[in-house]
Amino acid sequence: MQHKAISIRPFIGAKDFGVTSDFYKAIGFASKELFPDLTLFTFGVVSFYLQRAYIKDWVDNTQVFMEIEDLPSFWNTLKSLNLPEKFPGVRVEPIRHNTWGDECFVHDPSGILWHFGEFKNA
């Protein structure tokens, strides 16, 4: 039996919930507080939950891949935000070209690694 998926929303942790919330707003996510310890962040049709929870081993091993249309433009926006200067612990890494497509990387204030990528046309 086949079912239609509507969305997938991972839960990610935050070492400093307030700083991390501000970080995601700065890169373009809209936020909606659901509870004092849980916020829904949305970027277009993509969403995730940020929770006021920090387990170092869990956060250190969390990676999220988000497909982006027009990665070079998105990268230029990321660079212009000066995120490492505004948010301690944040790192941004430039676009890498792979056989499957291109991606850049952002480590959020807690250390979660985001892959922002664009697939090559098949």
Image (cartoon, helix red, strand yellow):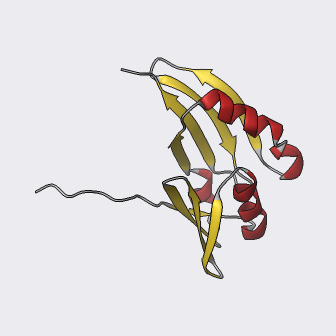
The N terminus - image quarter:
bottom left
The answer to which image quadrant residue 25 occupies is bottom right
* Residue 115 shown left or right of residue 100 in the figure: right
The C terminus - image quarter:
top left
The answer to which image quadrant residue 75 occupies is top right
Which residue is most to the bottom? 36
Which of these two is toward me, 111 or 37?
37
Taking the spot 63% from the left edge, 51% from the top edge, the residue there is 112
Residue 79 in view in this figure:
yes
Q: Is residue 65 above or below residue 24?
A: above
Taking the spot 76% from the left edge, 62% from the top edge, the residue there is 22
Which residue is most to the left? 1
Taking the spot 75% from the left edge, 54% from the top edge, the residue there is 109
The number of discs equals 0
Which of these two is toward me, 57 or 99?
99
* Residue 3 shown left or right of residue 47 in the figure: left
Residue 42 at x, y percent in the picture: 57, 59
Taking the spot 46% from the left edge, 61% from the top edge, the residue there is 9
Residue 121 at x, y percent in the picture: 41, 21
* Residue 109 shown left or right of residue 71 in the figure: right
Residue 81 at x, y percent in the picture: 82, 43
Residue 53 in view in this figure:
no
Q: Is residue 79 above or below residue 2?
A: above
The answer to which image quadrant residue 107 occupies is top right
